[in-house]
Image: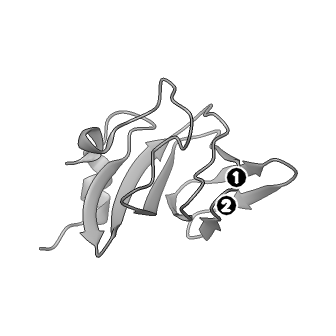
Amino acid sequence: MVKNLMKEFESIIDLWSPKIISEVNDVYVKIAKIQGDFDMHTHLEEDELFYIVKGNLIMQYDSYSVKLNEGDIHVVKKGESHKPIPKEECWVLLIENKSTKHTGEITNQYTKAIEDQLR
């Protein structure tokens, strides 16, 4: 199956609502449009890869931050509390284990179950 990444992004309406566009072995490939505030959260058992397709963001950690620009890839290591901060709309591609909870160990207004992320 062939999918066009940019067309997949164009179909997304809601911010902070990742959509699963593919799967490879035991990982999901997800895309999301994000902007504004999000909560600090942790994935205790899984790393999380961010690829910035469009825009930029600051990845805030407990004691430091990393600026990510269009085209950058960044891995949030398991157990690290983090908070993505995109001031403008940012398009991200995420690669996560199928067991990764959207908002880690917290539940908030952004939390999406896997069933809600399936296209």
Provide residue 42's location: percent of width, then percent of height.
63, 47
- Where residue 23 sits, quadrant-wise, is bottom left
Q: Which residue is mark 1?
A: 59
Between 115 and 86, the one nearer to me in the picture: 115
Mark 1 or mark 2, which is nearer the start of the sequence? Answer: 1
Provide residue 26's location: percent of width, then percent of height.
33, 70
Q: Would you say the residues marked 2 and 1 are in contact, meaning their CB atoms lie under 8 Å apart?
A: yes
Residue 96: mark in rendering: none
Quarter the N terminus occupies = bottom left
At a point 54% along the width and 44% down the height, the residue shown is 104
Of all residues shown, which one is farthest toward the top? 109
Q: Is residue 98 left or right of residue 58?
A: left
Q: Which residue is mark 2?
A: 68
Mark toward the viewer: 2 or 1: 1
Of all residues shown, which one is farthest toward the front? 45
**Mark 2: amino acid:** Leu
Provide residue 64's location: percent of width, then percent of height.
85, 54
At a point 56% along the width and 60% down the height, the residue shown is 45
The figure's colour scheme reads: one colour
At a point 56% along the width and 65% down the height, the residue shown is 47
Give the class, few, some or many, for how many residues have Cα within 10 Å of label 2's Cα (few <14, many ≥20): some
Between 61 and 100, the one nearer to me in the picture: 100
Q: Is residue 105 left or right of residue 33?
A: right
